[in-house]
């Protein structure tokens, strides 16, 4: 405190010189711009069809503007299947994710090797997109809900485990130390000192993954994973744009409603 | 209960113990020390003097680099994980920042002290035995906070949280209680309350107690034996009466300042609070 009241020194310290501009940053931005232009030219990217060719889309647009609402009465079962796929995949995927997350954090892993291997495994799992898992499991177990569920489990595992393990990395180490000091093993430590700390975030991630699943299960249905995506694929190949329109609008409403519900739940958690 | 059943000699013995941290810092430098069972020892010294290292080697939170450290007839240096855990079950520890899981109930925090005696499936389900809950409740009664058993730990004040942490130690039914700066995060009246809890537990249950403190008035008031540390060495070992200001100046390597005593402690004493030993 007494230091603050001292008189300022007679000669002010020399001010630092202005640092040189960050050429690296500007160079990087310029490169990004250049690559974008080159990429656009290499695929002959143009917006012209939007202006001159829209007539071709007229039957599609007309179909979409006249949804065949009565068709919805016949597709509630695939809708339910999509929902079930999302629920089952979320439940299994997130349960596995909690275990993987604990193995893939330095705080909770039993040893360094487990930590490194789990972390690598997770990044491999994450490197494939949901559609790729869909194609993979449709090839492995045939079309249908099972392929969709398996695909989404892997998709969920990748996301939920990564987010959760990062939350585990950031927990308060105090309780962990205290649990070590009472002579607890690593499983007890995870149960007593780590999981309670990450639980709200973890549940929030599970709900988030469930939101993603509803949307992703449509895509996975498109490649043969069952559910409403399958219906979309069939109607698309029959050019039934009226039916397609009804399904997509219904899907929009369902996804929006479930998202809103999940978001409300998540907000209460954290 | 455990105290009666335990082997009589639970002396803590340091024989030529050195601790070198991975960054090369020497925490302990060839320390020899003997702490007989039931003693109340206060360790003082500046920060970085090695007092925290000294306390944390006793339950293996800081690994010993060389030498031998025994509690009773059990060696701590170079033992496996399982043996270390069994030893830790008999050694409770209180921390500066309480180290409670604040999202869960006080009772659950205290039950952590029963983990060493709970089957894994029970602790995974959080379904503790009735007798373990009874031990936890008795521990909470002993620190006078039983009415908060089902409260979330985050809702308690600092002093209350530290008493829950002490109850967690009691629930272990330990032979030794370690406390690493247990009152450094507390205001002066609460600091005295917590120190008296530790003293009472040491007196009533005969649990060997080793406490780190940096306030020398607290050290003198509560420590039956005072150990002074500087640069990883024990530079003073004697009774509270022997530890006068001159001794503390030697330990600290500088003259004493107002920051070395607990602020307002004189006022607290005049309120008729602590029963000075």
Image: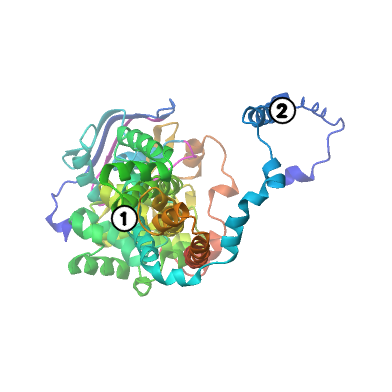
B192 left or right of A189 in image: right
Q: Is residue B163 among the parts visible in the rendering? A: yes
Tell me the magenta residue range. Answer: B27-48
Distance from the alpha carbon under mark 2 to that under mark 1? 48 Å
On-image quarter of the C terminus of chain B = bottom left
Taking the image as shown, residue B26 lies to the left or right of residue A53, namely left
From the top left corner, tell me how far across and down residue A245 is, in percent.
53, 62
- Disc number lying in front (2 or 1): 1
- Residue B100: tell me if it is visible: no
Q: Main secondary structure of the magenta part?
A: strand
Query: Which residue is pictured at 29% across the width and 53% down the height?
Result: A146
Question: Residue B92: x percent and y percent?
Answer: 29, 52
Q: Residue at x 36, y 75 (%)?
A: B147
Q: Residues within 10 Å of mark 2 (few under 14, many from 20)?
A: few
Per the image, label 2 sits on a secondary structure element best described as helix
User: Residue B33 in magenta?
Assistant: yes
Of the pair A13 and A225, the residue shown nearer to us? A225
Question: Residue at the right extreme?
Answer: A10
Q: Residue furthest bottom?
A: B147
Q: Residue at x 28, y 61 (%)?
A: B111
State left or right for residue B117 relative to residue B57. Answer: left
Residue A127's quadrant in the figure? top left
Is residue B207 one of those drawn in magenta?
Answer: no
Residue wearing tag 1? A145
- The N terminus of chain B appears in which quarter of the rendering? bottom left
Q: In percent of the image, x 31 and y 48: which residue is there?
A: A99
Q: Position of residue B250 (x, y in %)?
A: 49, 36
Nearer to me, B230 or B169:
B169
């Amino acid at each position: 405190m007494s230091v603050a009241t001292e008189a300022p020194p007679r000669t002010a310290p020399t001010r630092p010189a202005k640092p040189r501009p960050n050429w690296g940053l500007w160079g990087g931005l310029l490169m990004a711009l250049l690559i974008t232009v080159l990429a656009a030219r290499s695929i002959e990217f143009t917006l012209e069809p939007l202006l001159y060719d829209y007539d071709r889309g007229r039957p599609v647009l007309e179909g979409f503007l006249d949804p065949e609402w009565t068709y919805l009465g016949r597709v509630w079962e695939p809708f339910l299947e999509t929902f079930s796929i999302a629920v089952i995949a979320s439940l299994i995927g997130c349960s596995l994710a909690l275990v993987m997350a604990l193995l893939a954090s330095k705080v909770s892993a039993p040893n360094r090797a487990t930590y490194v291997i789990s972390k690598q495994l997770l990044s491999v799992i994450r490197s494939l997109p949901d559609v790729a898992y869909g194609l993979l499991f449709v090839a492995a177990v045939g079309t249908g809900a099972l392929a969709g569920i398996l695909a989404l489990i892997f998709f969920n595992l990748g996301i939920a485990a990564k987010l959760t393990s990062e939350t585990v990395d950031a927990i308060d180490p105090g309780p962990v130390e205290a649990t070590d000091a009472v002579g607890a093993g690593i499983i007890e430590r995870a149960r007593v000192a780590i999981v309670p700390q990450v639980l709200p975030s973890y549940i929030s991630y599970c709900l988030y993954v469930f939101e993603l699943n509803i949307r992703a299960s449509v895509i996975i249905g498109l490649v043969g994973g069952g559910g409403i995506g399958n219906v979309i694929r069939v109607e698309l190949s029959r050019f039934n744009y009226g039916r397609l329109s009804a399904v997509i609008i219904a899907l929009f409403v369902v996804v929006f409603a479930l998202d809103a519900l999940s978001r409300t739940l998540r907000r209460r958690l954290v | 209960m455990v105290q009666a059943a335990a082997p009589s000699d639970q002396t803590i013995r340091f024989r030529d113990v050195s601790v070198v941290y991975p960054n090369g810092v020497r925490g302990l430098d060839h320390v020899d020390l003997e702490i007989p069972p039931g003693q109340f020892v206060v360790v003082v010294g500046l920060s970085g003097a090695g007092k925290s290292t000294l306390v944390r080697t006793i339950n293996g939170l800081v690994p010993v680099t060389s030498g031998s450290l025994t509690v009773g007839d059990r060696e701590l240096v170079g033992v496996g994980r399982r043996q270390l855990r069994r030893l830790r079950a008999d050694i409770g520890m209180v921390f500066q920042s309480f180290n409670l899981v604040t999202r869960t109930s006080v009772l659950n925090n205290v039950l952590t002290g029963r983990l060493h005696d709970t089957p894994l499936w029970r602790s995974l389900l959080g379904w503790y035995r009735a007798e373990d809950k009874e031990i936890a409740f008795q521990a909470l009664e002993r620190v006078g906070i039983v009415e908060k058993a089902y409260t979330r730990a985050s809702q308690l004040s600092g002093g209350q949280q530290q008493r829950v942490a002490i109850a967690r130690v009691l629930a272990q039914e330990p032979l030794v209680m370690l406390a690493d700066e247990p009152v450094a995060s507390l205001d002066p009246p609460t600091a005295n309350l917590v120190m008296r809890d530790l003293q009472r537990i040491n007196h009533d249950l005969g649990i060997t107690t080793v406490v780190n403190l940096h306030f020398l008035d607290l050290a003198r008031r509560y420590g039956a034996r005072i150990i002074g540390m500087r640069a990883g060495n024990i530079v003073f070992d004697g009774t509270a009466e022997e530890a006068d200001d001159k001794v503390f100046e030697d330990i600290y390597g500088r003259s004493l300042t107002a920051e070395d005593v607990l602020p307002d402690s004189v006022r607290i004493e005049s309120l008729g609070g602590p029963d000075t030993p």
